[in-house]
Image: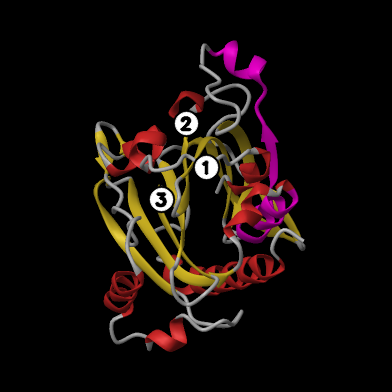
Amino acid sequence: MFTFLLGVFTIAMSGSATHESLNPLFKSLIAPGLLVGPDLRAQFPTPTMPDGLDAPKQKAVITALIGDDYAYADFTRKSVVAPQLLKLREVKPSDPTAPARGVDVWFIAYGRMEALDDEKFLDRIANAWGGEGKGTTLTKEDLVKRKIDPGDEKRERFGHIEFDFLDKVRLGATGRVLWSRTDDSVVVAAEIDPRFRGAADFPNQWQPLTKEGGAVAAGAANPWGGAGFYLKITKLAEPVGALFIEQHVVFAEPTGWFNGANLLRSKLPPVVQNNVRKMRREWAKGGN
């Protein structure tokens, strides 16, 4: 959701430190969890692929994950059209007027972790995963006037994005994004910042979309909040050059978005597949 901000970071190696110690936003998504309603927090799953595993243990993690859905050789093959694993889930606790949803994606790509040092490569990755939308990075002045600490500019950013979701709603959100990197992996964590709910500028809101005569019209704005994700990219010992990529998303879905219809199960899989394939192509290009 906030991947348009990826390209503005310098991702420095942090040695043997853990993501939990380096990335307080990532740690908070795991526990106490993301705020998805009045006094309601939803905890994210811990990473499927921990740091520090050797090749046999990494293979065991992947084998347990895919189960009978895919053969290990097929899931890890070096191909843009190799399978990905997608799971949609109901998240508890959540607000009945805006139930929380979970989206988890796992796949293998091939490339060099060093490519993450290249800003142009990060821009391409952001475009591959982020899709269409308008993004604005908030300045230090934008944050200071709201009494928000700008943080470490090399690893943390705030930005506002507006995009159409499944052609049904227009979402506007101001997010906080924080990177961390260890010897084995990179984590980017993000959440919609609740301090911008109802703000005059950079507001967190949603608008219903209607089509009339081929034109798209946005309806009245409604306050919105309760969304976040983390993306973890882990270098595998085997196969050579393989990267295990997992993304975990939680978001509140107001009942007004789809009028009670469950569109995610039919609409989201092809969108995810397309984004995964675009990201694989960019990793194959590397930092070139």
Percent x, y for residue 108? Answer: 49, 72
Image position of 55 with respect to 117: above or below: below
Q: Is residue 139 magenta?
A: yes
The residue nearer to you, when weighing 162 against 247, is 247
SS of the residue at dot 2?
loop
Q: Quadrant of residue 201?
A: top right
| Res 261 seen here | no
Residue farthest left in this picture: 93
The residue nearer to you, when weighing 193 against 233, is 233
Residue at position x 66%, y 61% from top?
128
The disc label shown at residue 253, or none: 3
Going by the image, does 236 lie left or right of 210? left
The residue type indicated by label 2 comes to: Asp
Which residue is disc 1 drawn over? 13
Going by the image, does 218 lie left or right of 39? right
Going by the image, does 79 lie left or right of 225? right
SS of the residue at dot 3?
loop
Which residue is disc 2 drawn over? 193
Few, some or many C-alpha atoms within 10 Å of disc 2 (few <14, some 14-19, many ≥20)? many
- Marks 1/2 in contact by CB < 8 Å: the verdict is no
Magenta stretch in the rendered image: 120-146
Q: Is residue 236 magenta?
A: no
Image position of 240 with respect to 231: above or below: below
- Marks 1/3 in contact by CB < 8 Å: the verdict is no
The disc label shown at residue 280, or none: none
